[in-house]
Image (tube, rainbow, N blue to C red):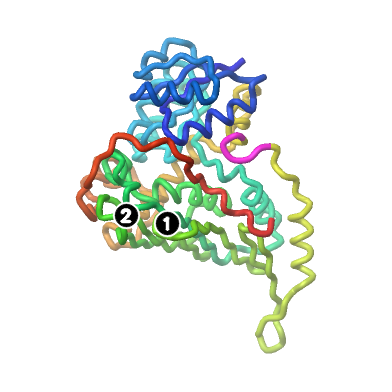
Amino acid sequence: MIKVAIIGAGAISSAHIESYLQFKERCTIVALCDLYPEKAEAKREQFGLDAVIVKDYKELLDREIDLVSVCMPPFVHAPVTIDFLNAGSHVIVEKPMASSLEECDAMIEVAERSGKVLSVVAQNRFRNPIMKLKHVLDSGLAGKILHAQIDSFWWRGHCYYDLWWRGTWEKEGGGPTLNHAVHHIDALLWMLGQPSELQAFMSNVAHDNAEVEDLSIAMLKYPNGSLGQITSSVVHHGEEQQFIFQGQNARISAPWRVTASESLPNGFPKRDQSLEEKIQHYYDNLEDLPYEGHAAQIDNVLHAIETGEPVLIDGVSGRNTLELIMSIYKSATTGEKVTLPLPKDDPFYTREGVMNNAPRFYEKGAAIENFADLTITTGSNYKGNS
């Protein structure tokens, strides 16, 4: 039986707890930790857990915890993860992996040295529309991908950034590019790989109580000449998120849609119904995942611990995602085109470098200690016609 500890009892912790409880024959939650113990107590009562509650996570380092879910603000992901890896625990750390590439490298190094599993939460890979889209891309039926469009559209009210650690480069590490589009960027890298260069812009158009951006747009260029674009936002009503891949043979997307064209003698398009039906048949015959979202990723991590097989989303994946995000911030800050990868002497490699170079759109205003524990959105708006 795998013994689990949840570090941080904020809103996202419920997704972890609910997921672990789906695998009661494989794991048990033995500890909850939060700086505000009453929040942990509320979770224990809500889910009927037989778990010890601590205020300081270091109290758990010598308790032989097998697996830890780190559900804390990004600026403490690295030290908490490293401490538990060194103590012999496997770790699932919430997105983003850390607040700097330097911290990511330190986390990966400790995971490799300890031989423990390090997995970074990117639960959207484990959703049927995204997993099936990946399989269709890999099939090659759509042909070479010529253009990718990623819309990471979210909406957050002005008071969202009143929480004490949000909206600052020091504590949150960035705005929606880092903390919301991270899921979409992870999936894009999984599907197409890392671009070779990018140009980006960012602004704060609706949240004058935050230092960070609330809207960014990045234009990507891949080594083969293909182009892409990523919009990261917390100002889009409806939160309509999508992936669109324009292949040489067909357009495919999540929410699912397939459209194919063939050329008339004059170069204008004619619908290629035969190819559309072929791709649709391939898509329809893909099996659904047994679990989705956080539950599916936790199942993947439990399986890795039980069998020694690799996880789908490891520390290197988490680092690659952060590298693209930091490249967007660098380009949007300097106004220059950025070439990847970022070297270790780049100012945007370290947390201090980001803090010293990133723009402050506004001075951080109100600082509320806690919000009520309400339902949150975690990005599952890909169902469409799937």
Q: Quadrant of residue 282?
A: bottom right
Is residue 5 located in the magenta-colored stretch of the structure? Answer: no
Residue 232: give its label. 1
Residue 79 % position (x, y): 35, 27
- Quadrant of the drawing holding the N terminus: top right
Q: Which mark is residue 213?
A: 2
Q: Position of residue 157 (x, y in %)?
A: 36, 52
Residue 7, x across and y down, in percent: 43, 25
x%, y% of residue 189? 52, 50
The span picked out in magenta is 291-295
Q: Is residue 58 above or below residue 192?
A: above
The local crowd at label 1, few if under 14, some if 14 to 19, many if 20 or more residues have their Cα within 10 Å, is many
- Report the front residue among 188 and 239: 239
Residue type for callout 2: Glu
Magenta segment main secondary structure: helix
- Tell me if I can see residue 112 in this picture: no
Task: Determine contact: label 1, label 2, CB under 8 Å.
Answer: yes
| Residue at the (27%, 44%) spot, across then down | 168
Q: Residue at the spot x=35%, y=50% of the render?
A: 175
Q: Secondary structure at mark 1?
A: strand
Which structural element holds mark 2?
loop
Does residue 177 appear left or right of residue 194 in this picture?
A: left
Residue closer to the observer: 313 or 156: 156
Q: As displayed, is residue 114 above or below residue 229? A: above
Image quadrant where one finds the C terminus: bottom right
Q: CA distance from mark 1 to mark 2?
A: 9 Å
Q: Is residue 292 magenta?
A: yes
Q: Which mark is residue 89?
A: none
Residue type at mark 1? Ser
